[in-house]
Structure formats: C-alpha cells, structure tokens
Image (tube, rainbow, N blue to C red):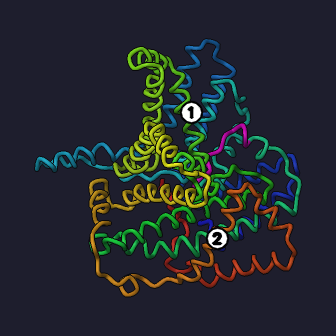
Amino acid sequence: MGITTLKFFVFLVASVIVYYIFPKKHRWIVLLIASLIFFMSACSWQLLIVLLFGIVATYIGARLIAENLKTDKSKKIALFITLLCIVGQLVILKYINIIPTTLNGIASVFNVNFHFATFNLLAPLGISYYALSLIGYTLDVYRGTSEPQKNILKHTLFTCYYPVMISGPIVRYNEMKEELFTPKEYNFKNVLFGAERIVYGLLKKMVIADQLGIVVNAIFSQYNIYSGIYLVIGVIFYAIQIYTDFSGCMDIVIGASKMYGVTLPENFKSPFFSRNLSEFWRRWHITLGTWAKDYIMYPLLISKPFQNLAEKCKKKFGKKIGKKIPMIIAIFILWLIIGIWHGASYKYIFAAGILPWLYLTISQLCEPLFKKLKDILHINTERFSYRLFESIRTVALMCLIWLFVLAPNFWLGFSVVSNVFKISNFDLRLALPQIPYMIILIAGIIVFVVDYLQYKDKDVLELFNKQGIIFRYIVIFFMLYLILTYGIYGPGYNPAEFIYGGF
C-alpha cells in the first residue's frame, strides 16, 4: 500500500474516522490495528514474525533492566543481549552479503573463483528505522532516562506506528509516548493542516522528484555517453530529486499522522540554504543525525578508552591538538556506521560515510587558516554574495557525494566522477526523455518559497492558514491540478519507491 495511492488515502480517511469515533481511552488501539494492517499489506506473515521478535526482545530486555535486575553487571549483560538481538537482525537481513561479495571481488582480482554464496533475504518494512528506535529506547531505559513500557501492545504500537515505517523519521519513546497513548480530541485544525501538508508532499514527490528521476535514470544508466555537462545536470537534478522525494515523503507521513492529532518530529529544515556542511547535516535527515550523536558519538567520547586516549594525546601533542584527535576518531566511527546504515555496499560506506567524515575533518583542521584568510582579505561573511557562495559550495560538495551514490558500485564511482570532466556533443533535448520542465520549475518555486520561510523560522502552515480563504483554496487546488495533470501515477508506476525507503 504505497502512500501516494488512492488505496492509501481511503485507508487513511477510514482509519481517522474510526479513530475519532472510538472511545477516547482506547483510541491508541485503532492506531495499532491500522499499523499492523499497513505492515501486512506490504510484507508477508513471515516478516511479521521478524518484527515481533524485535518487539518481544526489547520489551523483555527493557523490563529486565529496569525492574528485575539489581546489579550493574547483570543489567549490562541484559543490555548486550537485547541490542545483539536487534543489531543481529539488522545485520543478517541487510548486510549478510557484504562479506561473500567482498571475498569474491578480491578473489577475482587474482583470477581466482571462490564462488562464495550470497543470500536473497527480505527485510521487513522500515527495519532500518524501527531498529534504531528500539536501540535508542533500550539504551534510554538502561540509562534511566526512560521508563519501560509495561503494556506490550503499546510497545508494539511505538515500534510499528505505520506513518514512520516507510522512511522514518526515527522516533524516540520519550517524545512519542504522550503523542501515541494520550487520547486525542478531534480538532479540525489538525485534520486541515495534515491534509494540506499531504498535498504539498505529493507535489514534491509526484511532480518534481518522479519527473526528474526519469532524466536522472537516463543519464546515469549511460554515464559513459552522457558525460561532461550532462553528468553535472544529472547530479543537480538528483540533488533536487532526492530532497523532494525524501522530504515529500516526510510531508505525507507527518501530515497523515497529524490527522490523528499525533505530532512527529521534523526531519528537514531547508538544507540547501546551509552555509557549510555541518549545518547541512543538521538540517538534513535531522532525526538520524541527532540519534547518531546521542547514541554513538557522545557515548564514545565519554567512554573510558576515549578518555584515556584523550589524556595520552594531550600529553604527546599538546592540549589543543590532543582534544581534536579523539573527536576526529569518534566522528569517523559515527560516519562509518551511518555509511553502513545507508546500504550494504562499499559505495555507501564511502559516499555516505568516509567522504562526509573527510569533509568535516578537513574543514575542522583548516578552520583557523580559513579564518585568517577571511581577515586578511577583509571578506564580509554576512554579505548576500558570500552567503550565496557558501550555499553553492556546500551543495557542490554534496553533489560529489551523490555522484558516487548514483554510480553502479564503488569502483565505478571514480569513473563517473572522471567522466564529469569529459566533453560531450550530445543534444540533451533529443537524447533524453521529455519531461515538463516548466511545470517542475513552477512547483520548484513553491518549494523554494516554503523552504525560505522555514529557514527564517516561520511556521508556514500557520502563516498560510492566516491568509484569506479564496487565496488558500486557489493555492491548494492549483497544487492538486499540478499533481493530477503532471504527477506520475497510474499503470507501471511503483508508488512504494521512495529513495530512502531502500536504506
């Protein structure tokens, strides 16, 4: 049941009606049933068993840690076993093939055929997202910052609440328990704001992302032919595609959730206005970034091995440099895990892990030099022209990452990058599929205006709904017209295909 299909919207409207006519105290049960129906529509009963295994493991583990075990040692053992169950599931279902594939690749270099077998395993819907939520929940219970959920059905709802099962956001138990389990009064404003946000998300996904995806696929499926400027055009289109695809998905699921009165955390905040890469990643996939900092980087930095390393580095290299070395190592581990999370492929490990780490490390080490250059050249960093330069530079560096993501594999990623600098005489108008560029531009202007207002910390929905009713209806019906006339849907369209749904 793709979230851009008529079937989904019938399901959403029906479940919202049932939710508000159900007795208040038990309305969370409607969300649980709806979530299980949605999950089963996308997966088999065998994959439901995988989901239930993770639910039961964390339910038992969290309650043992908080209520039954008395010694620190026994709590650590329970924590280790619980996390092993969740991480083990994730590794087996998503990453088991990376070892035999690597060994086969190394063997082929030496003209040896080992033929290590690979496995064709299916993973449940949303496992990359709910697994991180369960890991965070278990660690919060262990740290004493969260109480364990004693009702296993409520714990099940937290794990598989259906709006977050497609592409996140990654939710925390402490921020969701009141949202999911506290009875919500019917509020027309919530339904209205939710519906408006869904329409906006559909515009991004179906009119911009899916249309641009046609050109991106055509270019990068033949990157040896479409070299030079066409690869540059292709990766710029992909930057727009991946943003409108992922953020459009977030708009749809956050809007759908809002119709029940349940507020989900935001996952994007105008990333293309960022002035540097650190700011970009604070605005892109926000919940993954904050999760990684809270459960990977900070625990590493305060761990005993890292504290000892910091002391040794300070003694050997001085206080200033000695403080940076453990931080650089911790950031490397964090980004390596993020790269692996994105996919069981070396191109993701490099493009989404090692390359961002290199960017940030070089930026951090060269920051004093950059500051001196700005002072010497008397650069006014608050001028519009310089801010624009910083934003373009940030997007350009991200486009290098996306070039590797678009490559068939890690090694061919270098070939794709090198082909950017080749000259091609292909005529883009004749060689590529025709798409409605003017309509995409119009939809893009809408997205640009909304993002700019968000960058200025404006509540766009509140601002929009303060306008006159005629203006609001014109805007909504215009977006619906663009979606129905120029959006991609119907026979042959796979509505389940969200880019981040594959991570």
Residue type marked 2: Leu
* Closer-to-camera residue (370/499): 370
* Label of residue 202 in the image: 2
Q: Quadrant of residue 150?
A: top right
- Return the x and y of residue 23 as percentages of the image width and height: 88, 52
- Return the x and y of residue 456 as percentages of the image width and height: 71, 56
Q: Quadrant of residue 447?
A: bottom right
Identify the residue position indicated by label 1 in the image: 295
Image quadrant where one finds the N terminus: bottom right
Q: Is residue 497 above or below residue 321?
A: below
Q: Is residue 141 above or below residue 105?
A: above
Give left or right: position of 421 versus 254.
left
Residue that appears at 85% across and 71% down: 467
Q: Is residue 89 visible?
A: no
**Residue extent of the magenta highlight:** 167-176
Residue that appears at 57% across and 65% down: 244
- Return the x and y of residue 409 as percentages of the image width and height: 31, 57
Question: Which residue in the rendered view is the most extreme toward the top?
Answer: 71
Q: Earlier in the sequence, mark 1 or mark 2?
A: 2
Question: Which residue in the rendered view is the most extreme toward the left?
Answer: 111
Indicate yes or no whether the magenta region holds residue 343: no
